[in-house]
Structures are given as C-alpha cells and as structure tokens.
Image (cartoon, grey):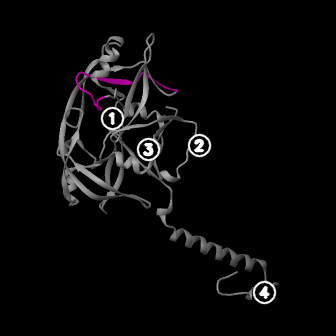
Amino acid sequence: MFPGRGNSWAKYDLRRPIAILLGLIFFQCSWRCRGAEVSADPANTNSIIMPFEMRRGHITIRARVNDSQPLQFMLDSGFGINMISPEQAEALQLKRRGTITIVGVAAEEQADLFEGVTFDLGNGFTYRSRRLAALPSQSQRLVRRDGVFGASFYRQFTIEIDYPSRSLTLHRPQTFKYNGTGEVAPLRFRKDTPSISASILIPGEAPILGEFEIDTGCDGGLCLGRDFVESSGLEEKLSPGKKSVRTGVGGDKRTHSVRLPQVQIGKLLIDRPSADLFEQGSPVDPGLSGHIGMEVLRQFHLIFDYSRNRLILEPRKL
C-alpha cells in the first residue's frame, strides 16, 4: 500500500497492465531501500574493518585526534598508556595535566600527561582516551608515526589482525562471538599489559615453562630477561649467539641473539624463533620471563579479546 492512500487501492482498475504495477512497486521498494542506506547510523554497527601498514615490523593504523587530520598510530600491547609525539601534542593544543613516569627497557622517563582526547577511527567508531602521554625522547623514536595505541585501545575493542590482507577488524566486545577452532590462550594482566604461559622446547631437555608478556610493539621473536636466562640455564643449552642491542624507552640494552629450537603455546609449535637474551635487566616486569613479539605473532591470525581475558591464535599458511 502506498503512503497516504488509505484503502483506495481497491478503486484501481485491475485490468491495467501488470508491468505498470510491478514497476510502481519496484520504484517504491527502491526508494525505501536507498533511504534506509542514507539514514543508517554507522554507530549502530558492531565492527569495522580498516587497513593497516607494516612499518619496521610494526602495525600502524590511522585515526583522527579531536577532529585532526588522520595521524599514524602504532599498535603496542606492551604500552600501558596511549602515546602521542610531543610535536603533535603541541600542534593539537592538547591540555597538559601533569606528568607520568614511563618505565622502559633501560630506565625510566618522565612524560607530559594529557587528558580528554577523542580518537575517531571512522564509520562511527570513536572512543575517549582518559589519558595520553608524550615523551620527549619519542621525537626521535616515533619516526614516520605520530603515536602509540596501548592498553586502553586493546580494552576498548576486540581486535582481529589478518596479516595477509593487511586488515584490522575492530569488534564491539559485547556483541563479539568466536566460533572458530583456533588456540585460545588465557590472558593474565600485571597492571595493564597481557601475558600468557608458553614453553621453550630443547631436544633432550625438559620443557622450560615461562610467563611471557605479549608485545605487539616488539619486532623480534622473544626477548628474555636476565633472571630467567640464568635460572633456566638457556645459555649453556644453546649455541653461542651474536651480540646485539635492543632499544626502547630509557635507552639501549645489550643482548645475545640466538635461535630457540621450538616454542610451544598451548598445542601450537613455533619452529626456530629468534630470541634476544638480555645481559642485564629485563624488558618486562619482575616475575615475568620476557616477552613475545611480532616475529612470532605474525605467524597467526590473531584475536585480542581483553574483555574475556583471551588471545586466540589461528595458524595460517606462510
């Protein structure tokens, strides 16, 4: 029935050509469908797919900050707070709210703290970041990117990472359901960063169990703290490695780079990942063995589901 015509449909001559009737119905339905598409509220959608770039082994995506031009942010699950470069903080005239101490691989640094920042990811996906920090040293470190998405970003969305297609899917956690057959690794949190249990497998030796932070901001395989290296006797069980350096907040740390025979996460086996054995200190908090970085993680289709305390790893063909 057409709008505004009440029951007058019965007055039409039914001998009129069927083609005209069908044409009118098609026109009406088409108009309604087009109108629905135009007026749809994108905020009611439950997920958004967005492209990402790999820059020096890191995932970066674009987002607007307080209606700015799109800026480039790296995804870093090892960061407890979102970051922005000092230059962008000044350009956007963000309101400073004191300072915060950032603990890095080599030392601590003081960062300016900002509040009340809204990120716009497109298609109605926005969120307000309670805090945002800017480190002076990030002027050199954040080359070709404008900031870092840390813990609060991972808690805001369920994040699905598809490396072959270079796409990132953000799901609203309350509506996300997983029906796949991937390995579900329980996540534990110390402060804001996630960790999982994993084992280092060496032929002829008992598995070396550890608790490893998941760090998407690390472009390597595993970085292992000195206490864990010594307590596990790893250096005596592996071929000598070459000297190397790991760089992060606070400066550099000297390491030995080696290849581990295998690492096991649940039922999944990762063959010959690289590992940096710290000569002093650790890249993670006390009590953790080290962290697992992108060299290992990119071998899987990943789903970070902080709302349910889980990381889902689906093997993919390399």
**Among the two numbered marks 2 and 4 on one chain, the one whose residue lies closer to the N terminus:** 4
Evaluate if marks 4 and 3 touch, with contact meaning CB atoms under 8 Å apart: no
Residue drawn where x is 70% and y is 87% of the image: 6
- Residue beneath disc 3: 306
* Type of amino acid at the residue the image marks with label 3: Tyr
Where residue 12 sits in the image (x, y, percent)?
77, 87
Residues 50 and 136: in front is 136
Residue drawn where x is 58% and y is 36% of the image: 181
Residue lying at the far right of the rendered structure: 15
Residue drawn where x is 36% and y is 41% of the image: 77
* Type of amino acid at the residue the image marks with label 2: Asn
In the image, residue 151 sits, relative to residue 253, either above or below, namely below
**Among the two numbered marks 3 and 1 on one chain, the one whose residue lies closer to the N terminus:** 1
| Alpha carbon distance from label 2 to label 1 | 29 Å
Where residue 91 sits in the image (x, y, percent)?
20, 58
- Residue beneath disc 4: 10
Residue drawn where x is 27% and y is 28% of the image: 282
Residue 218 badge: 1
In the image, residue 227 sits, relative to residue 195, either above or below, namely above
**Among the two numbered marks 4 and 1 on one chain, the one whose residue lies closer to the N terminus:** 4
Q: Secondary structure at mark 3?
A: helix
Q: Which residues are magenta?
A: 267-286
Instruction: Categorize mark 4 by other alpha carbons within 10 Å: few (<14), some (14-19), many (20+).
Output: few
Evaluate if marks 2 and 3 touch, with contact meaning CB atoms under 8 Å apart: no
**Among the two numbered marks 2 and 1 on one chain, the one whose residue lies closer to the N terminus:** 2
Instruction: Categorize mark 2 by other alpha carbons within 10 Å: few (<14), some (14-19), many (20+).
Output: few
* Type of amino acid at the residue the image marks with label 4: Ala
Residues 53 and 5: in front is 5
Q: Secondary structure at mark 1?
A: loop
Q: Left or right: where does residue 88 sit relative to residue 149?
A: left
